[in-house]
Image (cartoon, grey):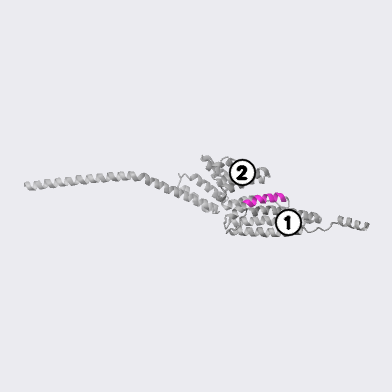
Amino acid sequence: MRIKILTCAITVALGLTSCQSTRQVDKSSAGQRQIQGADKSPSAEAGQKQEQLKNEIDQVSLNESKLDQGLFEEARLGFQEFQFKFPNSNLKMQASIGLARAHFGLKNWDSAKNQYQRVIQSSTDPKIRGLALFYLSFCFEAEGDDLRQLTSLKDAENLAASMPPEIGEVLLPSRLGIYYKNKHDLEKAQNYLKRAEKGMQLRGGKKIPAHNYLEMGQNLMPSDPKENLKLYVENLKWRQIFLLNAIEADDPKWSSQSLLEIKKSYGGLISMLNPKSDPSLFEEDTYLQKFRLKSVAQEISSALNGLKRQAMVGTANPYLKDLNQYISQVESDLMQKTLDLSSPLPLTRESQKRSESRQKKR
C-alpha cells in the first residue's frame, strides 16, 4: 500500500512538475515571440508604407506618360482608379491635376477647369498650386477668355520658382511670350521667349515632351508672308527653335509632325520666289521685281542660317538627317535663285529713250 501511495505521489509530483515546466516554457516562448514581434513590427510597417508609396508613384508616373502620348481616355481611367484606391495618398493633388489634364485632352473643358480650381482652392503646396494655375490657362485659352488666361499665367509666374524647371523656366515663359506675340506686344514677347530659350539651354529643355514643343511652335504660327515678310520671318525664327527641339526628341509621332511644320513654313517663303505664285507681286517694272525678290531671298537666308546653326549634324536621328538634307536643298535652290537675280538688268523704257537720245546727238 505504501508503495502504491508513494508511486502515486511520485507520479503526481512528476505530472505537476511537467505541467509547470510546460507552462513556464510556453510563457517564455510567448514572451520571446512578443519581444520579437515588437522588434519586427515597426520595420515591417515601414516596409509596407514604402512599398505602397512606390506603387503610388509608379501609377501616377504611368498615367502621366499616357498623357504625354495623347492617350487621354486611358489616363483619365487610370487617375480615377488611383483616387479610388488611394484616397489619402500624398500624391492625390498631383493625381487630380493629371485627371484634369486628361479631361482637357478629351476637350471636356468645364470638367478640367473645375478640377484645377478645386486643386488651387484646397492645396497649400506652391508647386501644386503653380502647376494647376499653369494648366488652367489652357482651359481659358480654349474658351477664348484672354484676360483670365493671362491672369492664370501671371499667377503661375509668381510660383515659378517652386515648379519643375521644365515648366517654370521653359513652358511658362514660352506661353507668356506666345500670348504677348499674338497681342502684338513684341517687346514683352521677346523678353519671355528669350527667357524660355535660356531655360531650354540651361536646365529644363530635355525633360519636356516633344508634343509640348510642337504645340508651342504651332501657336507661333507666322502671319501671311505676303502681308508682312519681316514679321513672318521673325516669328519663324522663334517657331523653329521649338520645332527643332521636338525633332531632336526622335519621336515617331511628334518629331515627324514638327519636321513637316518647318518644311511648310519655308515652303511658303520659297514659293514667293516663283512669279507664278502671286502675279500681283510682279506687275511692277523689272527693277522693282528683282529688288523685292532679293529681299525675300535675304529673309529666307537669314532664317535658314539660324536653323542651320541650331540643328545637330552627324546624328542617328532620322528626322534630323531629313532636316539637314532639306536645309542643304533649300540653300542650293536659294543660291541659284540669288545668282539669277544678280544677272544684269534689262534697260527700262525710260533708260532706253535716254540712250537713244544720246546716240542721235552723236
Of callouts 2 and 1, the N-terminal one: 2
Q: Is residue 93 left or right of residue 197?
A: left
Give the overall secondary structure of the magenta segment.
helix
Residue 230 is inside the magenta segment: yes
For numbered disc 1, what is the local secondary structure? Answer: helix
Q: Position of residue 296 (x, y in %)?
A: 73, 54
| Amino acid of disc 2 | Gln
Residue 62 is inside the magenta segment: no
Residue found at x 7% / y 48%: 3
In the rendered image, the quadrant that contains the C terminus is bottom right
Q: Across the whole image, how many numbered discs are drawn on residues?
A: 2
Above or below 130: residue 58: below
* Any part of residue 81 in sight: no
Checking the image for residue 272, the label placed there is 1
Q: Observer-nearest residue: 204 or 239? A: 204
User: Residues under labels 2 and 1: Cα distance?
Assistant: 36 Å
Magenta residues, start to end:
229-241
Disc 2 target residue: 149
Residue found at x 57% / y 47%: 202
Q: Is residue 285 left or right of residue 213?
A: right
For numbered disc 2, what is the local secondary structure? Answer: helix
Q: For marks 2 and 1, give the one nearer the viewer.
A: 1
| Amino acid of disc 1 | Met
